Image: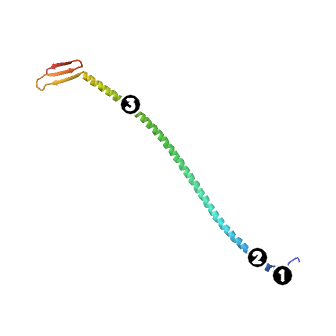
Amino acid sequence: MGVPSLHSQSITLPNSDPQIRDIELELDEEKRRHAETLKILRKKERSYKEIIIQSEEDRQNISLLQETLDKVNQKVNIYKRQLQETEGMSQQSVTRSRRFQRELEAAEDRADTAESNLHLIRAKHRTFVTTSTVPGSQVYLVQETQRHTTTTSEGY
């Protein structure tokens, strides 16, 4: 009984035929699942690569946006500094303008006072010249002061 004969093998083959068919069906099912798994794997790999590419693009966009933001921040700082300088100059101009306005008002007050004094002095020392329309008549110089009036006659 050491070596099975061909006859015993052929007998076992027909009995194993349903088992072989079952195994072949399982193998076909496994091949189908394997093909489906490979198909899903390729889709996932493609999706993975697309995500990696998108991630790189996003990283580059973030880098560009960061550079742009840095430049904008530099401009904002420059504009802030210019605004501060302009505000300082504006404040100096306002201060100067106020000082000039005070000086102008003081000068106007002094001018008004001088004009009033001039009117008073003129009123004290008024001089009138009167002439007659008749040819050969005399010219009268009338000088008024606060206390008295003098009249002089001159012939012309």
Mark 2 = which residue?
A: 20
Neighbor class of circle 1 (other Cα within 10 Å; few <14, some 14-19, many 20+) is few
The amino acid sitting under disc 3 is: Arg
In the rendered image, the vertical position of residue 51 relative to residue 128, given as above or below: below
**Which mark, by number, is residue 7?**
1
Residue at image position (15%, 19%) is 153
The amino acid sitting under disc 1 is: His
In percent of width and height, residue 34 lies at 69, 69
Q: Nearer the viewer, residue 87 or 57?
A: 87
The amino acid sitting under disc 2 is: Ile
* Image quadrant where one finds the N terminus: bottom right
Structural distance between the alpha carbons of marks 2 and 1: 19 Å
Residue at image position (42%, 34%) is 95
Mark 2: secondary structure: helix
Q: Do the residues labelled 2 and 1 touch (CB within 8 Å)?
A: no
Mark 3 = which residue?
A: 102
Structural distance between the alpha carbons of marks 1 and 3: 136 Å
